[in-house]
Amino acid sequence: MPKNSILFAICSGPLSLILTSCSLIGLHTDGEVKKLQSAAYKAGITNGKAAEVRSRYHQEEEAKALPRPPLPKRYYRMPVEGYTTSDGVKVEGHTVTVEVVQP
């Protein structure tokens, strides 16, 4: 008779009333197996989420550390017509150079 069948006979026989759990001697009931599988599944999900969070954090940190190329700039000359300010100062027409940063 194989060893497992002897242990099963002990766990399912009159001795099972004395033992609170057959897992003490290496056998698990279906309910215990399902609990262990459920706990392992939940632990795997939790570890997977934590690994994803860590991965995302490190990706963001690496992206911050990378040097960014300077944004392209263009300069435009725009004419400004003459005008009078609110305090009566007259400004002649002139041109203004405007810097435009293109993302």
Image (spheres, helix red, strand yellow):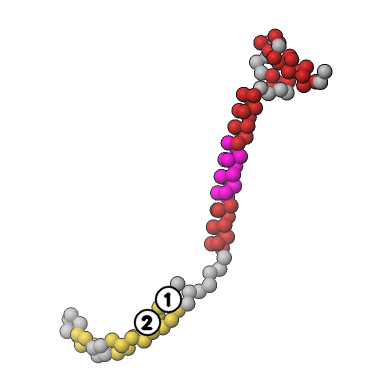
Q: Is residue 79 inside the magenta stretch?
A: no
Please identify the quarter of the rendering in which residue 33 is found: top right
Q: Amino acid at mark 1?
A: Val
Residue 59 x, y percent position in the rendering: 57, 57
Q: Main secondary structure of the magenta part?
A: helix
Residue range in magenta is 42-54
Seen as rendered, the residue at the extreme top is 14
Q: Which residue is mark 2?
A: 98
Q: Is residue 58 above or below residue 8?
A: below
Residue 77 x, y percent position in the rendering: 36, 86
In the foreground, 28 or 71: 28
Mark 2 → mark 1, Cα distance in angstroms = 10 Å
Residue shown at 66% from the left, 10% from the top? 17
Please identify the quarter of the rendering in which residue 46 is found: top right
Seen as rendered, the residue at the extreme right is 1
Q: Is residue 45 inside the magenta stretch?
A: yes
The quadrant of the picture occupied by the C terminus is bottom left
Q: Which residue is mark 1?
A: 101
